[in-house]
Amino acid sequence: MQSELWRITIDTNPEDCNLSCIMCEEHSPYSDFIPNLYKTTGVKRRRMPFEWIEKIFAQAKALGVKEIIPSTMGEPLLYKGFDRIFSLSQETGIKINLTTNGTFPKKSVVEWAMLIVPNTTDIKISWNGATKETAQKVMLKIDFDQCVENVVQFIKVRDQIYKESGYYCRVTFQLTFMQNNMHELGDIIRLAAKLGVDRVKGHQLWDHFEEIKPLAFKKDKASIEQWNKYVEEAYIARDETVLPNGKKVLLENIIPLKYEEQQQTPEDYICPFLNKELWISATGKYSPCCAPDQLRQSLGDFGNFETQTIQEVIESDLYKNLIKNYKKIPLCQNCNMRKPA
């Protein structure tokens, strides 16, 4: 089986975050993970050593990997020396795919944009409302108006660099689909078009905590019907607004739910990650997907970066068997990330 690995996510600094989003596995006010971190992991704070990042880029280059995503848990721009990751990108030719909460800490937005845009294929900005009231109920501590202004400034730099160099960095709004924010989905798409945001994408809620289970759309038939109405509204919003460049906002993963998804993901839905992407935690642990950590442990132990190379992992029998048999595994049978082929 030939590997098609093209992207790797590295959890550079999962504990570092300046927000507290209610659905976050670690930083939610409902999560007890960080208070119990030392008890459960044996470390007080997880930060990936930069020497590992250098080795990961080298191994990834040898395997033909095209993109690396710095941490999607926590705020990656808080990683000390993040600038050096862009240097590795330039040296290896591997582009960065960045997920950020849109606060752009430690530097001005313009300074970050000058670093990010030339080295990045796509910047995904976490976005969970079209209004301050909704956004700030989901992403606690966020200044919504400031984040809108940050996007304006970032896209201004992005467009100028594209004009001068011809290199285009896509900007995406990354959503979590919940019952307390998706009533604004159409308006989020309209806002994206107004600001010059190219894409709106997201995923259904992983309901880690009892407090957020009522926010899931898969919980019952009525909730599924409500989500499906929001999907219809989303495509109406897309079709009635255009970006400054005349194109429509790209919608991704905004698709109707089937009633059977209350119990199980449809059999014909595929995993978008296996044999294509890989995750490496701040402590070196390999994972085959982005399911919540406590859940994906059920997929098996794929080793640690300190003792195994990336190539050894993707060539292992455990990994190959997962690719062949994932639809038989309970976690995968109820996965929010599988999608129609």
Image: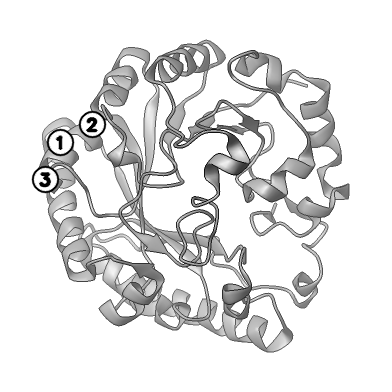
**Residue 268: % across, % down:** 80, 56
Tell me the distance, in whole angstroms, between the alpha carbons under discs 2 and 3: 17 Å
Seen in the picture, residue 29 relative to 112 is either above or below; the reply is: below
Of mark 3 and mark 1, the one earlier in the sequence is: 3
| Residue type beneath disc 3 | Ser
| Residue type beneath disc 1 | Met
Along the line of sight, which residue is nearer the eye, 205 or 28?
Answer: 28
Left or right, 315 with respect to 229, comes to right
Secondary structure beneath dot 1 equals helix
Asked whether the viewer can see residue 251, the reply is no
Of mark 2 and mark 3, the one earlier in the sequence is: 3
The disc placed on residue 108 is 3
Q: Nearer the viewer, mark 2 or mark 1?
A: 1
Marks 2,1: beta carbons within 8 A: yes
Residue 311 sits in which quadrant?
Answer: top right
Q: Name the residue under label 2.
A: 118
